[in-house]
């Protein structure tokens, strides 16, 4: 039987969420049992340990040294981490945008080559455009394609939650950017600009802005830093200059609307649907709204036990969105 101190160590490592220690204590227990001559129990324990290790390693990204990451210590509350499965094919965008994203991905995939000449892959990227046009999705796609974690930072909440110490918090985030390769998404980036107009925040916002500019200037990590905004007019020109790329998102044109609808409804029978009539009616909708239209039409068909989705059903879903 395992000794009491081994069980205590096992429970402690469980409580501290220290998986490496947990498995090392378990290995010690297996060795102890083997020494006692309890061969069957020792083998069973070793098999279980191997299974756990295998499962864990298949959960981390293939070919990547990045472990499963959760923000720790002071980073809790500043960043949220996730892994993304999104791929370029999930994004419906113009060919110009597509080429710009392809170039970012290529420079990151070939970063060893680039770094050998003391250059860095383009990695400071500003995404500008109306709500629901794929800015957040782009950050997910870059993380998914490069198989690195996605860290999201909601600027608005960092600024309001840490008033007075935002610049110090930004330093922590930029330290993490250097230490852990990932896609870092500064969402609601215009929050920096909008706070500038409230009198008592002026000094603080100037400080935050200056710190941000300085951190951006100094950064030569291989992480991807993305800032996303709906209101570029609120941003300083000095900020724009710090980015390697500024990508502009806009509402989908007719072809893009049709792409979004057909890919969202790929599992349904849509034979005979007049896509161009629908696209014209949906011309003021964002990508996100078009996807919702497709989902609404699909749910209606399912609930009515109808196998086919027709033009009328999709148009009535569009009409509901426009209302
Ligand atoms: N370009 C796109 N291609 C495919 N799907 C899209 C696209 N844009 C948006 N969508 C759909 O809408 C959802 C929401 O989009 P997303 O969060 O990327 O918008 P956003 O531009 O970040 O909006 P916001 O400015 O409000 O943050 C996505 O998860 C996706 O389902
Ligand atoms: Mg977004």
Image: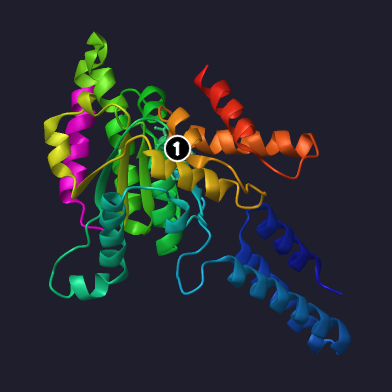
Which residue occupies 42% across, 57% down? 88
In the displayed structure image, the side of residue 235 where residue 129 appears, left or right: right
Q: Nearer the viewer, residue 129 or 239?
A: 129
- At horizontal 31% and vertical 34% (from top left) the residue drawn is 129
* Residue matched to label 1: 287
Reply above or below: 321 against 238: above
Q: Is residue 105 inside the magenta stretch? A: no
If the image is split into quadrants, where does the N terminus sit? bottom right
- Boundaries of the magenta span: 205-222
**Closer to the camera, 54 or 5?**
54
Q: Position of residue 172 (x, y in %)?
A: 33, 44
Looking at the rendered structure, the secondary structure element under dot 1 is: helix
37 vs 148: above or below: below
Magenta: main secondary structure equals: helix
**Residue 80 visible here:** no
Q: Where is residue 312 in the image (x, y as percent from the top left)?
A: 62, 31
Whole-percent x, y for residue 304 in the image: 79, 34
Determine which quarter of the picture holds residue 199. top left
- The part of the image, by quadrant, that contains residue 186 is top left
* 13 relative position to 101: left or right: right
Give the total number of marks visible in the rendering. 1
Report whether 207 appears left or right of 190: left
Q: Can residue 156 be seen in this view?
A: yes
Identify which residue is drawn at 66% across, 70% down.
55
Q: Residue at x 27, y 20 (%)?
A: 194
How busy is the neighbourhood of tag 1: few (under 14 within 10 Å), some, or many (20 plus)?
Answer: many
Does ligand 1 reach within 8 Å of label 1's beta carbon?
yes
Quick check: which quadrant has ligand 1?
Answer: top left
Residue 271's spot in the image, x, y percent?
A: 62, 49
The residue closer to the viewer here, 66 or 109, is 109
> Which color scheme is applied?
rainbow
């Amino acid at each position: 039987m395992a000794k009491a101190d081994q069980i205590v160590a096992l429970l402690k490592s469980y409580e501290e969420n220290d998986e490496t220690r947990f498995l090392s204590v378990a290995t010690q227990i297996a060795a102890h049992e083997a020494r006692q001559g309890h061969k069957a129990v020792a083998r069973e324990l070793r098999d279980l340990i191997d299974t756990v290790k295998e499962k864990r390693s298949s959960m981390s990204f293939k070919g990547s040294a990045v472990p499963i990451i959760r923000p720790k210590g002071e980073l809790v509350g500043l960043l949220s981490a996730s892994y993304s499965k999104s791929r370029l094919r999930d994004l419906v965008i113009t060919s110009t945008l597509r080429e710009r994203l392809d170039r970012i991905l290529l420079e990151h995939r070939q970063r060893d080559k680039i770094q050998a000449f003391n250059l860095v892959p383009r990695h400071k990227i500003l995404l500008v455009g109306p709500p629901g046009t794929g800015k957040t999705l782009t950050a997910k796609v870059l993380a998914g394609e490069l198989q690195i974690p996605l860290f999201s930072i909601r600027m608005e909440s960092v600024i309001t939650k840490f008033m007075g110490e935002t610049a110090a918090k930004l330093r922590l985030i930029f330290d993490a950017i250097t230490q852990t390769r990932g896609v870092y998404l500064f969402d609601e980036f215009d929050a920096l600009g909008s706070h500038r107009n409230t009198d008592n925040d002026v000094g603080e916002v100037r400080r935050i802005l200056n710190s941000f500019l300085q951190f951006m200037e100094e950064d030569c990590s291989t992480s991807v830093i993305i800032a996303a905004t709906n209101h570029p007019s609120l941003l300083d020109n000095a900020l724009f200059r710090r980015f390697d790329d500024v990508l502009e998102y806009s509402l989908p044109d007719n072809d893009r609307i049709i792409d979004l609808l057909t890919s969202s409804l790929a599992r349904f029978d849509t034979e005979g649907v007049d896509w161009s009539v629908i696209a014209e009616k949906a011309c003021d909708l964002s990508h996100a709204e078009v996807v919702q239209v497709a989902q609404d039409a699909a749910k209606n068909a399912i609930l009515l036990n109808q196998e086919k989705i027709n033009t009328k059903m999709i148009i009535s879903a569009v009409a509901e969105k426009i209302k």
